[in-house]
Amino acid sequence: ILETFNQHQFAYLNIDQKGHVFEIILNRPEKKNALNPVLLNELAFALSYAHYNKEIWVVVLSAEGNVFCAGADLKERNGMTDAQWMAQHALFEQMIMALMDCPVPVIAAINGASYAGGFEMTLGCDFVYASKTARFALTEVTLGIMPGACGTQNLPRAVGVRRAKEIILTGEPISAEQAYEYGIVNKLCDPENLSEEALATAQKICDNAPISIRQAKKSMGMSQNIDL
């Protein structure tokens, strides 16, 4: 991964590294950054690179355009056989596990609508800065499916089971202000300042000891899965 990454040509990601801050930017704005197999593979590859590159201390995940991510590309999914759909879903699983298993902090900078799989990516990050115009929803039940990228696990951990049931079972969107009130979003930002504020926090983390950051993140993650 480390040897081939710099030669890789990304179709739907912009990648930037400044010092120890690694930016992963979704770049399929004409499709609302919807997740197709190519983009899912690219995300998993970029996150794996961040996992193994010891010079990366923080990841910032954001998107081009005025929509963060509309979720899975349902137009590409139409007409798939069951086997093709299962193969695509395996890519979702690989991507979300690469995100959640990343040993360094991942900050989400959400600039617009974050729906379905996009919201599940948001929930898989360590914490979230959002534009005041952002919106969030898990819309899967309105389409006859259910959240399949750990949304049913990460949302209750963020907001509590009762609130999560309301959000998932209605499929209704919530505003950035509601997401902040519920504990999904750490900070609301003016749209023009979102990237700057997320990167500034990333740099504050980088000013600290990198092994301490990795181990503290790992320990806090374990706190959600084992007893005291």
Image (tube, rainbow, N blue to C red):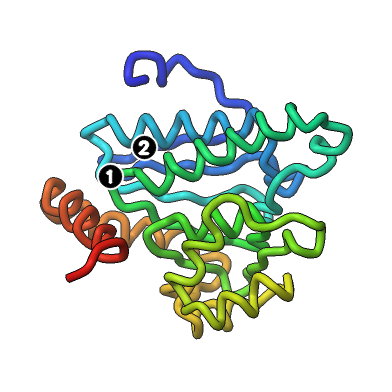
Above-or-below relation of 136 to 59: below
Q: Quadrant of the N terminus?
A: top left
Residue in the image at 46% along x and 55% along y: 124
Amino acid identity at mark 2: Gln
Residue in the foreground of this view, choosing between 38 and 159:
159
- The label number, if any, that marks residue 17 in the structure image: 2
Q: Residue 66: give x, y in percent of width and height.
A: 68, 57
Instruction: Say which quarter of the image contains residue 93.
Output: top right
Q: Quadrant of the C terminus?
A: bottom left
Crowd band around label 1 with a 10 angstrom C-alpha radius: few (<14), some (14–19), many (20+): many
Secondary structure of the residue carrying tag 2 is strand
Q: Residue 153: give x, y in percent of width and height.
A: 49, 62
Residue in the image at 15% along x and 47% along y: 210
- The label number, if any, that marks residue 103 in the structure image: 1
Q: Label 1, label 2: how many angstroms apart (C-alpha)?
A: 17 Å
Amino acid identity at mark 1: Pro
Farthest residue, direction right: 79
Instruction: Say which quarter of the image contains residue 79.
Output: top right
Residue in the foreground of this view, choosing between 14 and 150:
150
Q: Residue 208: give x, y in percent of width and height.
A: 14, 55
- The label number, if any, that marks residue 65 in the structure image: none
Proximity of marks 1 and 2: CB atoms separated by less than 8 Å:
no
